[in-house]
Image: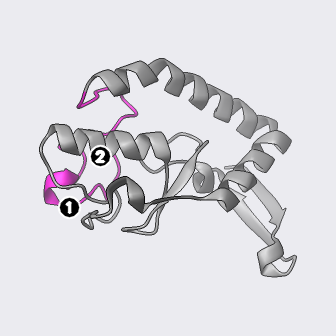
Amino acid sequence: KSVMTSQTAAAGGDSEQFTEDDFVCPISQEVMRDPVILVADGHTYERSSLEQWFATCDAEDQQWRSPLTGAPVEEKRAGLVPNHTLRGIIESAVARNPAWRLRAEADAARSATRAPALVATAPVTTPASVDCKRVQGGCEEGGAKGGHA
């Protein structure tokens, strides 16, 4: 895995290391472009992937739950907070690291080709998408702690 060292003002200028995993949505496994914090669990996700997760839960008439912890989500979309700090770190890393730039571009292209299907149908069955019932625990039983099937 690629490692990037970043100076963080919040840490008094100390170096902090990030790996690709820090920039990847736990749902889509793609580099995040619009990271948001889900207030219900405190984890960061790509906005479009999290909205797809919730749309799938809605289509299956299931309660919204955190994809990682299974915690009930009561706030719905009002419970999403933009993660501006992480977005800036990702943008900086992608701009400076050719390997991450290529991955981010490939992920964005993959997402763009999938986007119309995400809006038009649920549940979505593309390989990187999340189907609540296919995921360990799913919406019905409490979250996707183990990732996708």
Q: Which residues are magenta?
A: 122-149
Dot 1 surroundings within 10 Å: few (below 14), some, or many (20 or more)? many
Q: Residue furthest front?
A: 78
Q: Tell me where residue 86 sits by quadrant.
A: bottom right
Q: Indicate whether 48 appears above or below 39.
A: above
Residue drawn at (66%, 35%), measured in percent from left and top?
A: 104
Residue drawn at (23%, 31%), measured in percent from left and top?
A: 123
Residue to which mark 1 is pinned: 142
Left or right, 24 with respect to 75, comes to right
The amino acid type found where label 2 is placed reads: Phe
The kind of secondary structure element at disc 2 is helix
Q: Indicate whether 116 appears above or below 84.
A: above
Q: Residues under labels 2 and 1: Cα distance?
A: 13 Å
The kind of secondary structure element at disc 1 is loop
Residue to which mark 2 is pinned: 54
Q: Is residue 108 visible?
A: yes
Q: Residue furthest bottom?
A: 12
